[in-house]
Each structure stands twice: as C-alpha cells, then as structure tokens.
Image: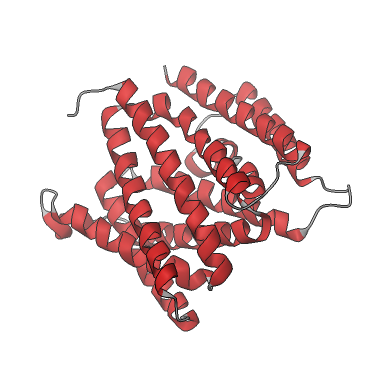
Amino acid sequence: MTEQNTRLGILLMVTTTFIFAMQDGISRYLAGEYNVYMVVMIRYWFFAAFVMTVASRQAGGLRAAAATKQPILQAFRGFLLAAEICVMVAGFVLLGLVEAHAVFASYPLLIAALSGPVLGEYVGPRRWAAIGVGFVGVIVILQPGFGVFTPAAIVPLCAALMFALYGLLTRYAARLDSAATSFFWTGTTGAVAMTFVGIWFWEPMTAHDWAWMTALCITGAAGHWTLIKCYEVAEASSVQPFAYLQLVFASALGLVVFGEVIETHVAVGAGIVVAAGLFTLWRARVSGR
C-alpha cells in the first residue's frame, strides 16, 4: 500500500484541477468550431487507449481489468459519463466557462442529496440544510424570474445531475469491483458509445485545430493520471475540497482567453454553492470519523 502523503495529494489535486480547466477551455474552443459529438468522440478514443495502456501494465493485464460481476452497471456508468461530457461541453459553448462551471459546482451537493435514495446512506439535518443553502446559490446564479433566465442555463445543471449520478454509481460499483475495473469500463464503453454517435457528425479539421485536439487528448490523459496518483497518496476526504479550484481556474481562463465577464449574481451564487459544498464535505468527514 502506498504511504499516505496529504501534502503531495493536495498538490496533485490542485494540478489535476488546473489540467482539467485547461481541457475545458480547449473543449470550449473546439466545440465552438466543430460538432460537439465529434470532439468528444476523438477525445474518448485517446482516453480509451490510455485506459487500456494503464490496464495492460497492471497485474493480470486487460483481462483482469475487464473482469466484472456487474457489466450492465459498468456499461451504464460509461455511457452516462460520455453523455454528461457532451452536455457539459455544449454548456461551455452556450454559456461560457464562468457561468457553466458556477452551476456545475453544485454536483457535490447533488451527490449528498442523492446518496440516501441511491446508496441508502444517512444524510443528517445539517447536511440537508447545507444542500438547501447550496441550491439557493444555484437559483441566485440562474436568476429565474428576473428576465435574464434562458433555457440554456439548465444545461450545466443537467450535467451536474448526470455527473452526480455517475459518482454515486461509481461508489455503488466499488462494492464489487476494483477502481481499476471501473476505470477500464469508463474509458472503453464511453469510447464505443461516442463512436456510434460521433462518427455521423465527422467534419474536416484544420491542421491548427488538430494540434488543439491533440492537446485536448493529452490534457485528458494527464488529468486522469494525476487524479489517480492523488488518490493513491492521500485520503479522498483530505483532497476533495481542493477540487473546487477548477471553478477558479476555468473562470480565469474564461475571463482572460474568451473575454467573458463575471456577473455579480454569478459570483455571489458560486460563493454560496462552494461554501455549502465545502460544509457537506466537512460534515461527511466528521460523520465518517
């Protein structure tokens, strides 16, 4: 077993959030130029190759990684994550990185809210209160009833719900399968699903944009590698709060590169959502003790 090193784990989580923010920025650009399904399909081809390479180097190789007692659940997880990525990338194009990430930051609250009905876990009154406060923050961001709400604002909220369900199903799958098996099925089934969909939307890509696509694939693999290493050296409860830095990095990228602006209501709402999310993580850690 790898020795626990919380400081290194935090550094790796911060690095992971930065890499994923860069990936989101590249996705926003490419999906604005080409079809979302094609962009996500190519990204998944590289991801599947990365997953299979990692699995082949583990004990037992590909056969051991693919061995599962719950193939339907694992396949559904893979399909769900692929669909969530398509929805979220579409959200980047429709709303920009700042607002899309501000709404998506609610996914830990959704995980906490759904952990009871999906996993049968106990959620105490304090965490339910934090969940309620967090969704007040989402309402502040979306501003329904103020004449600025658009249906597009629901897109990142749908992505957050899908990602929360994916996270819960991953925890459910962990009762019978190893993390390596879940990781293998995530990459391979997602690639199969996106190929069936994305191949019909193929568009010629310029050499310049192929360079960006290569960067997108590399950041995807690098982000997953640093995330794996992060959880190898530190407890999830110690590093998970730092995952919120992806909102900071992605927003900075939106401001500097894409010329987006941070509206006051988005900043206030995002602050409420993050504060509520950090509280639920802290309560989960206290309850775990």
Occupied quadrant, residue 248: top right
On the rendered structure, is 55 left or right of 32?
left
Q: Is residue 191 left or right of residue 98?
A: left
Q: Quadrant of the N terminus?
A: top left
x, y percent for residue 65:
20, 54
Q: Is residue 71 above or below residue 156?
A: below
Which of 193/253 is in front? 253
Q: Nearer the viewer, residue 177 or 103?
A: 103
Visible in this render: residue 116? no
Q: Residue at x 55, y 44 (%)?
A: 250
Q: What's the residue at 62%, 26% (across, down)?
A: 275
The answer to which of 243 and 108 lies nearer the viewer is 243
Q: Viewed as shown, does residue 240 lie left or right of 176?
A: right
Residue 29 visible within the image: yes
Residue that appears at 52% across and 53% down = 25
Q: Residue at x 45, y 81 (%)?
A: 204
Residue 284 place in picture, x, y as percent: 50, 24
Image position, residue 41 (x, y; %): 42, 69
Q: Is 187 located above or below residue 138 in the figure?
A: below
- Quarter of the rendering containing residue 92: bottom right
Q: Toward the viewer: 167 or 50?
A: 50
